[in-house]
Image (spheres, rainbow, N blue to C red):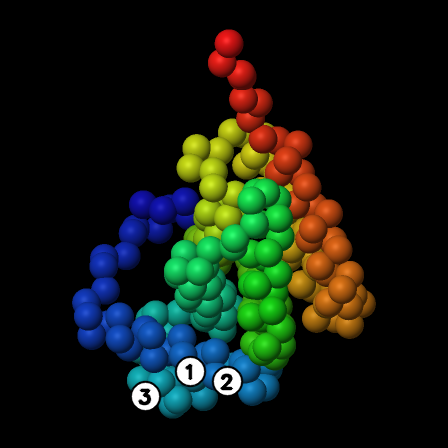
Amino acid sequence: MNAEGRPASPPLTERQEARRRRILHASAQLAGRGGFEAVQMREVAEAAGVALGTLYRYFPSKIHLLVATMQDQLQHLHTTLRKRPPAAEDPAERVAETLMRAFRALQREPQLADAMVRALTFADRSVSPEVDTVSRLTTAIILDAMGAEHPTPEQLSAVRVIEHTWHSALITWLSGRASIAQVKIDIETVCRLIDLTAPEVTATP
C-alpha cells in the first residue's frame, strides 16, 4: 500500500514502459508547443499511438500526466547532473549552480515549464504520490549537489526551504514578475542556509 492507501502498482513490463515513455514524450511535445491547454488527453493518445482508454489506465487525468512529465524531466536532469556535477568547492555554490542549470533547462521551454508548474499547483490529494515523487527527486538533486550522504534534520529543513524558494521563483518568472537576474539572486541567497546548517567539525587535538 502507498501513502494514499492504494495498492502498489506492479512493475511495468518492457513493452508497457516503452508505451509509458511514448505517452510522456507526447505530453512534453504538446506542452512545449502550446502549454497547459494544449495537453488534451485525446491528442496525447493519438500522438503516442495508444488508445484513449489505455492512456487513462496509465494516467487518470491530465494533472497526473503533467506531474509525471515533470518527474520524467527531473529524472533526466538528475542523470545529466551526475554525469557533469557542479565544480564549486562550497556546497551552497554547488546547489545554486545546480538549481540555475535546472532553471535554464526549463527556460528553454517556457510553455512546457508553465504546464508542469500549473499541474503541480492544481494537483489535489489524488495526485499526492506523484507530487511526492517530484519533491523527493528535487531533494535528491539538491543533496547530491551538497555532497550530503547523511543529511542532518537541520540540513533537510534547509533543503525544504530551498525547494520552496526555487518553486516560487519559477512561478514568479513564468508570470513575468521576476527577471532571470532576480531569480539567480534569490536562489543564491537561500542557498546560503546550507552553510548555516553544516555540521560542525571538531578539530583533532
Q: Amino acid at mark 1?
A: Ala
**In the rendering, which numbered label is found on residue 26?**
1
Disc 2, disc 3: CB below 8 Å? no
Q: Nearer the viewer, residue 130 or 147?
A: 147
Taking the spot 54% from the left edge, 22% from the top edge, the residue there is 201
Look at the numbered disc 2 and give the secondary structure of its residue.
helix
Taking the spot 26% from the left edge, 75% from the top edge, the residue there is 18
Q: Is residue 22 above or below residue 4?
A: below
Check the image and name the residue furthest to the front: 205
Kindly identify which residue carries mark 3.
Answer: 49
Look at the numbered disc 1 and give the secondary structure of its residue.
helix
Kindly identify which residue carries mark 2.
Answer: 30
Query: Which mark is in front, 1 or 3?
Result: 1
Of the numbered discs 1 and 3, the one sitting upstream in the chain is 1
Taking the spot 69% from the left edge, 64% from the top edge, the residue there is 171
On-image quarter of the N terminus: top left
Q: Is residue 75 visible?
A: no
The CA distance from mark 2 to mark 3 is 14 Å
